[in-house]
Image (tube, coloured by chain):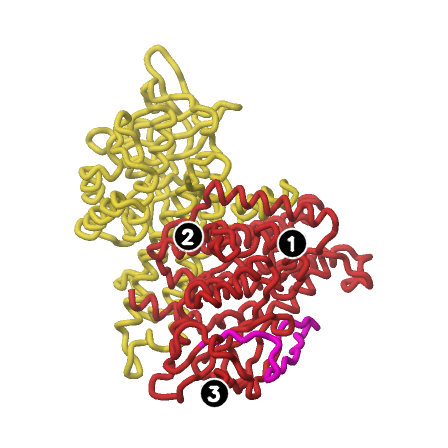
Chain colours: A yellow, B red
Amino acid sequence: MSEYTHELRRTAEKIFVDIGTPMLDPELDTRLWNELEKAEFTTLSVEDSLGGSGGDLEDAAALVELCGYHGARLPLAESMLVGGWLLTAARLPMPGGPLSVASGSLSIDRTAAGWTVSGKLTAVAWGRSADHIAVLTTEGATSRVVLVRVRGADGSLRNGVAVAAGANLAAEPRDDLSLTEVSVDPRAVVELPVGHDAEALGLRQALARSILLCGAGRRVLDCSMKYVSERVQFGRPIGTFQSVQQSLAELAGHVGQVQLASEAATLLAGNPVAASMAIAAAKATASASAGPIAALGHQLHGAIGTTQECGLALVTTRLWSWRNEDGSESYWNSRIGRLASSHGGAVWDLITATTVRSQ
Amino acid sequence: MFGMSVGSVSESAEEVRGDVRAMLVEQLRVGRFEPVSNSWMVSADPDFSRMLGARGFIGLTIPTEYGGQGRSAMDRFVVNEELLAAGAPIAAHWIADRQMVPSILRHGTEAQKRRYLPGIAAGETYFAIGMSEPDSGSDLASVRTRAEPTAGGWRINGTKLWTSGAHFADAMVVLARTEKLGENRHAGLSQFIVDLPNPGITIRPVLSLDGSHHFNEVVFEDAVLPPSALLGELGAGWRQVTSELSFERSGPERLLSTMPLLSEWARRVGSTGADTVDEEALGRLTTGLWTLRQMSLAVAEALARGDDPAVPAALVKDLGTRFEGTVVETIRECVQRSAEREPQRPSTPAEPDRLTRMVDAAVLQAPGFTLRGGTNEILRGVIARELAKS
């Protein structure tokens, strides 16, 4: 990680800590979003000319990881890492405000009076609070992005937008949106270049979710280390007991694997040959380790960890939710298995080829 | 990850990989060896080692003035991971190349470097490590083998156990007590390089449960060593032994011991058509291997840079060696499941096919993976304590 990225993280960390109000609540943390937007931390890795704040994918990933770590109530990953990528591919500028992303079928009605879109989008992350949704639609071999404005300037839902609220275990909105002849600017409907289809979107979403899971896992480890060093029983901190040390090392092993896998996948995301394997492996690792990380974290914290007031649940509910979103370990491991299988089982070749190259 | 960056491989190292692969393809084509799991422990083949030495695949980091290749640690990493993945018979020279080279380069005298390094690089000089004893395993500092100064140099008495490869080694490094045990139990230990054979040294095979012979018991009865046998500083044995810990814990051999089995099974899955259970299991193992190999690579690169990522290195050993066992257990389950789906085939065929033989061989060797190189429970204690420091 470059010194620049380190500095970025330090500044962003302060904002999350000072401004963020973490809680299990579906309401978007508007004050936090606005502060991050002001600091230009909501459009990293998007070029200046498209309304972005520059920087590279590692910078954006650092912010997303912090979002997971702090249990931040906002669609930063969706807006920046996924939405930014999708809109950049279409050469569309980033709209201000919270942006979410969805994949679905929309019918586009092109009339002289104006264009409208209709369709149903399911389980949209932060659907009810986003200002815009970038929707990837597929028609045969053609993929398009439709940037739909769902909220008006006054914050209310626009004509034709209906929301059926849903949530994951961390109380994060996962809403079904019904669009009925919602007006859309023709310039906001753009055909995507080859390689930016539903499959590519799925990979990008999996990368974002892996990085979020990484942050949440790291938080569980930090909380657990702190707790076992402070909690005294039988006359000494419980962290001095061998059985607790074994569990802590087990937890560190899981967290370390998720970290390294998502960091490597971030570095390989731009490599067409290696990206699919790396991202699939990162998401599979993050999803598979999420359960053990949560279980170990709770076991180390004892009963207090199961309460709302403790705060551990802010990240363990995210681990339990995010492991299933954007492809579980089963989904991605099956894909990797098929990939290896289709190459005559040449697993070692696949592994050595999926590596960062240096000078 | 824990302050350590993702590892990378240079173009030149990838070229070396290509050279090793070409050599392995050629060797396999002529049936020179059969890939086996755990080959770095169980398959000693001096001719093969000499061939590798002649082709520059051993002693990669030994300076050219001592007969080595003068190449980078990353080149060595790449060569070794290819040989391990292929299950090639590298046991004869493994200890010498991997453990003695850094040790002699760091602590050896000029004479010791000139005496041993060229032979190691040529794949002709083999070493054994005399550290553990019958009563000293995890608690290595409790070793009782003692070295007393004598007219001819040093007199050694004691017993070493596990000493892999002592039965064909040209020399062994011995950790012995040179000062009476005092308050600081790590003080007063020294290392010696012992040339073999020695009239005061008796080597007895210790057979493993699968019938293989790599372990030995080595008894020292007034074995005399010349003064030049001392390796490094008198009394600094503990520091010398522990100075390479991160390097020893994090090598590719800590996760690739069962790669030959995984490759064989993966080829089977690839050739028998869609079985979703097998494919998902194959994916799970591939994912685990990719992540752990990335970890080993990252640690190797960090060490080459002069850092010491103690937690990641210990994690590679703990996670990697457990993963080696997971490979065996997962494949065993899948192979057994497939076999039971075919009602005509018995579960233990009279003439087991190659895959079944490889599974069985790995099952019998698996217990050792998480015991050697630092028992995992001890490693986990180290990890927890290192984390608490940060």
Pinpoint the chain carrying mark 3.
B
Q: Hey, which quadrant is residue A86 in on the image? A: top left
Where residue B301 is drawn, which disc sits there?
Answer: 2
In front: B288, or B214? B214
Instruction: Name the element at disc 3.
Output: strand
Task: Looking at the image, tell me whether mark 3 or mark 1 is earlier in sequence order.
Answer: 1
- Residue B208 % position (x, y): 66, 74
Dot 2, how many residues are within 10 Å of its Cα: few (below 14), some (14-19), or many (20+)? many
Q: Answer whether residue B289 is visible to the viewer in this image.
A: yes
Q: Nearer the viewer, residue B336 or A131?
A: B336
As drawn, the label of residue B150 is: 3
Q: Is residue B328 visible?
A: no
Kind of residue sitting beneath label 2: Glu
Tell me which chain the residue with mark 2 is part of.
B
SS for callout 2: helix
Closer to viewer: mark 1 or mark 2: 1
Q: For the residues carrying marks 3 and 1, which lies nearer the camera in this image?
A: 3
Instruction: Tell which circle, 2 or 3, labels the residue nearer the N-terminal end.
Output: 3
Q: Nearer the viewer, residue A74 or A26?
A: A74
Determine which residue is flagged by label 1.
B51
Determine the residue positioned at 36% across, 23% down. Answer: A181
Same chain assignment for discs 1 and 2 = yes
Quarter of the picture containing the C terminus of chain B is: bottom left
Q: Crowdedness of circle 3 by 10 Å Cα count: few (<14), some, many (20+)?
A: few
Question: Residue B389 location in percent, x, y?
Answer: 29, 68
Overall secondary structure of the magenta section: strand
Specify the segment rendered in magenta.
Answer: B191-215
User: Mark 2 or mark 1, which is nearer the start of the sequence?
Assistant: 1
User: Chain ID for label 1?
Assistant: B
State the quadrant of the N terminus of chain B: bottom left
Pointers 3 and 1 within a single chain: yes
